[in-house]
Amino acid sequence: MIADEFAGFFFEIGEKEVFMICLDHDLVINSENIHEYSHHVRTSYLEGTQVFPPLVVELKFYPDHNRFRSSLQRSNVEMFFTENRGNAFLIHLCESYFINVSSIVLRGCLEREMTLCLQKLLVEFYYINFDKYIFPLMPVTGLAENHIRELVHKLEHALKDYLATERLVNLDLGLPQVYFRLAKINSNHRDAENYRQALPHSWSRALFLSRKLMEFMPIIILEKYRVKRVQELKSLWLEYNNYLLTEDLHRLEYLAELPAKHESSYTEQVVAMFRYMKFHYLTPRHSRFKQYDFH
């Protein structure tokens, strides 16, 4: 039974809580075990999560993509979607995506989503005050303000995924993240065309790169901790995104390493990322906006 193959336990080392789950690489997900396995992952994770108010997560399954998308009324989601219901969360899962896939991929998906849910219960991860911390750095209005807000939203998304991945690595749960991202990564030819169209327009280019950062930042933290198979994951991502200019790729790497250089509050990390993007993509030469010495 899956319960025997997937045993979880929780213990403490000093003041650091460590939550571990025995990995079972050989288990393949099918229509008969996906529900039971998913619930074991959820239960084991929640038992090892000590927060107040407690994290509450429920799961809902859909057998195929058509019912998954029509029920959610979201055509752009493919395999999972997390819904916030007050202090509780509901993770919608499309079963067909995970059928005949190694269980470690499903584990990585669920543990990542639950960690992102956990962040929403923690004060330090509340959305930053845009008017207080971002607007003074670039006081624009109208469409320009909307553009900046979207950019900051994507930077926050990338940082939260990075920090969620780091938390999982520190709990010895990094390997499922590598497998999950290996299964999720794909080549999108439209990205290359969209990038070429954005290149002459620095603000559009910044938005495009912020979306790429959302994919790239978790890979960098997995690489930092030398999680198994992460080099394979990074090489595949670089291969699929080989259309990026060298300067943009270097800047993505710099941005991905910024949180480690600014071991401060979440808000300060977001602001540091925004300053960097502003300097390279949003501030024209001879602008009245203050420039910072970034490389």
Image (spheres, grey):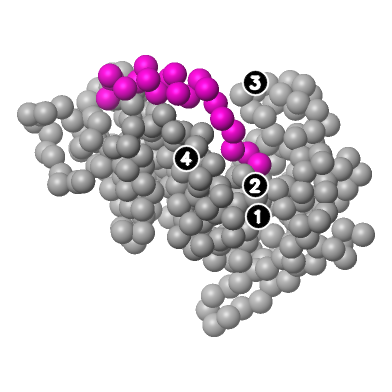
Q: Which residues are magenta?
A: 183-202
Question: What residue does disc 4 label?
Answer: 238
Q: Please tell me how crowded label 2 is: few (under 14), some (14-19), or many (20+) other residues with Cα within 10 Å.
A: many
Q: Is residue 206 magenta?
A: no
Depicted 19 relative to depicted 36: above or below: below
Q: Residue at x 66, y 76 (%)?
A: 11
- Frontmost residue, 9 versus 260: 260
**Label 3 or label 1, whichever comes before in sequence order:** 3
- Frontmost residue, 50 versus 235: 235
**Mark 3 is on which residue type?**
Ser
Q: Nearer the viewer, mark 3 or mark 1?
A: 1
Q: Residue at x 80, y 67 (%)?
A: 7
Marks 1/2: CA distance? 6 Å
**Mark 4 is on which residue type?**
Leu
**Label 3 or label 4, whichever comes before in sequence order:** 3
Q: Nearer the viewer, mark 3 or mark 4?
A: 4
